[in-house]
Amino acid sequence: MAANDIVQSLVINQSTRGVAATGSVTMADAGDNGDTITIVDGQGNSVQFELDTADPPVAGTGDQAVLIGTLSTDTQAALMAAISNFTEVACAINNVAAEATVTFTTGAPTDGAIVTVTDYEGTAVTFEFSAAGDGSTGDVQVVKGATHLTAATAFEAAVNANAIKVTAADVGGVVTLTQDLACVEGQVSSDPAETVADANIAVAVWGNSSLADGQTGISFTNRVPGAAGNQTISETGDTFTVVGSLANGVDGVIDVGLKGHTQTGMELVVHKRADGQIDFTSNVDGVRVITHEEQVRRLFDELVDVATRDFS
């Protein structure tokens, strides 16, 4: 009997795409010996990653040791590599560079006024304002000019010409200082400071509510879509803060069906969910006891697996 005598059409429909669970953590610093973070992926793999100062690192209680770096970004790179190797979770960098401002108002700064800027590596440079650039206190002499605008422009140029790892940008007398590396160290340990008080200079340090805090973070995404990825990220110690555990994964649904069976007039649709469950629905009662059900089930299972690969 020819196939078209039985089946009018084969329908493969991706009715709902699978959604992968996501989450993230932020780091307070480069890490403390013994601090841990535990990841459970959508496949049920649970791995505890433990920070260690030894090189190569050695895990005390955790499953996998991770080397603590000089900066939080160093530890971040080692941790991301370990998580990607031992779980079905993809990692992405989620970092922010710290910003601060130095605002020049009304007239030019007085001679001898100093602004000290420290970068994420802890290098500090003092910038001293004077009329002729002949100051004696600061590391870098800044010719202030006649107005607050000329002083701001000169300060911007001086910072950018220096080896300090901070970039300055002047807009109308407000100079924004941005750490050259996006990491938490730029906000935690490095503040600009006005050493010599001057009414014409206002300093807002890294991390004020109106400025960007330095942040070192990792975003997680389960490689396999589905609700099985809705798991909790747990941590010990004070290095990590869980921003969002792996959650919100949604099962995908694939519909595969035979429509217009010429002998019975029935329509048969097979649903396969991301967890592997298969359901039959039909316009004819008793469809679950059709002849050769197991062979039909295997056929649809194979068809659904092919369709599933296309969206997972």
Image (cartoon, rainbow, N blue to C red):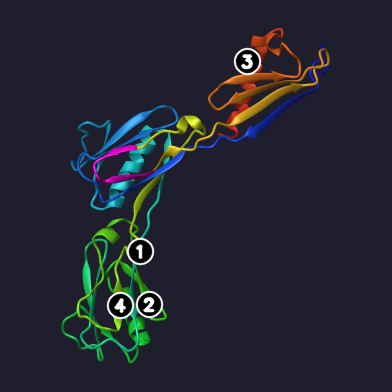
Q: Under tag 1, what secondary structure?
A: loop
Residue extent of the magenta highlight: 234-243
The quarter in which the C terminus is drawn is top right
- How far is the residue under mark 2 from the one under mark 4? 9 Å
Q: Earlier in the sequence, mark 2 or mark 4?
A: 2
For the residue carrying disc 3, how many other residues have a C-alpha within 10 Å: few (<14), some (14-19), or many (20+)?
Answer: few
Q: Earlier in the sequence, mark 1 or mark 2?
A: 2
Q: Mark 1 and mark 4 in contact? Answer it, CB < 8 Å.
A: no
Name the residue tied to disc 3: 298
Quadrant for residue 10, please give it: top right
Q: Mark 2 and mark 4 in contact? Answer it, CB < 8 Å.
A: no
Q: Mark 3 and mark 2 in contact? Answer it, CB < 8 Å.
A: no
- Magenta stretch holds residue 261: no
Q: What amino acid is labelled 1 in the image?
A: Ser
Name the residue tied to disc 1: 209
Q: Nearer the viewer, mark 4 or mark 3?
A: 4
Q: Earlier in the sequence, mark 3 or mark 2?
A: 2
Vertical relation: 116 (above or below) 225: below
What x and y, as percent, mark residue 81? Answer: 35, 41
* Residue appearing at x 34%, y 55% in the figure: 215
What x and y, as percent, mark residue 22? Answer: 45, 40
